[in-house]
Image: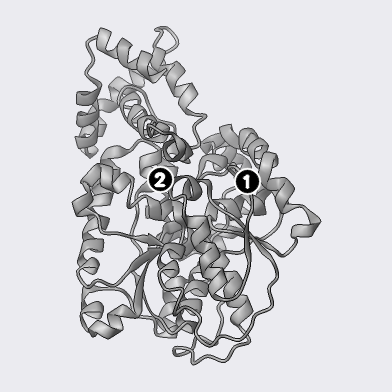
Amino acid sequence: MIREWLRLQSQAGIDVVEESRKKKAERTWGFIKSFPKRVMNTVSRQQHHDYSHEVYDAMAGCLACKSCAGQCPIKVNVPQFRSQFLEVYHGRYLRPLRDYVIGGTEFMLPALTKMAPLYNATLGQRWVEQLMQKGLGISDSPALSRASVKKQLRAWGVAEATPTSLALLTEQQRANSVVIVQDAFTTHFEAKLVMDVVELLSRLNLRVFVMPFSANGKPLHVQGFLGAFERTAEKQAKRLRALSEFEVPMVGIDPAMTLTYRQEYVKALGGDKVPNVLMLQEWLATRVNTLAPGQPTLKDPGFKLLSHCTEKTNAPGSPKAWQQVFAAFGLQLELATTGCCGMSGTYGHETRNVATSKTIYAQSWQPQVEADENTGKLLATGYSCRSQVKRYSAQTLHHPLQALLALLTPVSHPYPNNMQERATK
């Protein structure tokens, strides 16, 4: 379909590469100047056949999970050319308001979190949900965490990862330190998870630094705002490079957001400009020999891991890395066989995709989640996966490190500062 679209564009004398370049370079004034033309094109679209509309409808069905790119022998990346298509398409036609809301999510969340109780109360009103469905095309928006990651980490005395704080470390201290690179979704929707990760790593006698939150840009890329994505990526990569000079490992909590640094960032900026940001299990697996020294024998609940589809297809060794981490604590971890959960970032929150999202969830995740023999045993690595389970099965699945923390909680440990005072969501 894309090949036919490209052929028709070429036949019409349209250089899509040049169109894309212009759209990337477009700023506020360029957007305003092109607005009347896009309005006219949108209003008259019913009168003039454009094959682009058929491609647009087809691309709406892409979950942007990148499983195709990870599993295809020739690495066909549908989400990538979907984003490129959307960029060109919306250079001619108006975007739905939904795209701007989703694309700007990371930039809005820090402000919204400051009034989380009011936001959540408003979101809980049925008329608001109906308005969002019909007006924005967004369904089942999750509630924000009431707890503030920033405030709790400050109370615990956990240092921010800055060039100044890392420069004070000795070589030995750097070898036993780690920087957590925050992502918008766990920080603002699952604040307790971020706190639990910090607590667990501290229990393992690791010195934890947390990088101040800044946008990753993945939602922009998914929606085809490639110019804005590249500008966001340049800023974030610059921050990461400043920290990477001190050779302290940098890790991300959410796998899909973390993989953006080694995929979309590298494609947009070049590999030499993007430092390595590891997923938690990738880094922990390199420390298995010193991970749990002298830990008492833990009761093994027989956990099962439900991996994020982007994670297990684009970093195939990552589920086994979790097994290595659990084995270091004397625990078994079974890798459950599942497909996509149907949420895939924000795909499942788009009203037009809700029915498809629910169908996908029912195919492999729902039977596993709702099976009696799996009660209390299932763990999920992806934020969107845990969100989908809560949405359709009304259950809370924990992250693997939260499960380890729960087992280690009775163990005596010299907490940093006030870490005994556990925050609640």
Left or right of 311? Residue 234 is left
Query: Please, what secondary structure does the residue beneath circle 2 have?
Result: helix
Q: What number of labels is visible?
A: 2
Left or right of 313? Residue 405 is right
| Quarter of the view holding residue 27 | top left
Where residue 167 sits: x, y (%)?
Answer: 20, 79
Q: Which residue, given by chain and number where applicable, does mark 1 sit on?
A: 338
Where residue 369 sits: x, y (%)?
Answer: 71, 53
| Quarter of the view holding residue 75 | top left
Q: Which residue, given by chain and number where applicable, does mark 2 sit on?
A: 219
Left or right of 233? Residue 357 is right
Q: Nearer the viewer, residue 396 or 278?
A: 278
Asked if 346 appears above or below 61 in the picture, the reply is below
Where residue 386 sits: x, y (%)?
Answer: 60, 55
Where residue 348 sits: x, y (%)?
Answer: 57, 41
Q: Earlier in the sequence, mark 2 or mark 1?
A: 2
Query: Please, what secondary structure does the residue beneath circle 1 have?
Result: loop
Q: Can the viewer see residue 295?
A: yes
At x 37%, y 29%, the residue is 86
Mark 2 neighbour class, 10 Å CA radius: few under 14, some 14 to 19, many 20 or more: many
Q: What is the three-letter code of the residue carrying label 2?
A: Pro
Q: Nearer the viewer, residue 232 or 167?
A: 167
At x 33%, y 66%, the residue is 250
Asked if 394 appears above or below 72 in the picture, the reply is below
Q: What is the three-letter code of the residue carrying label 1?
A: Thr
Mark 1 neighbour class, 10 Å CA radius: few under 14, some 14 to 19, many 20 or more: some
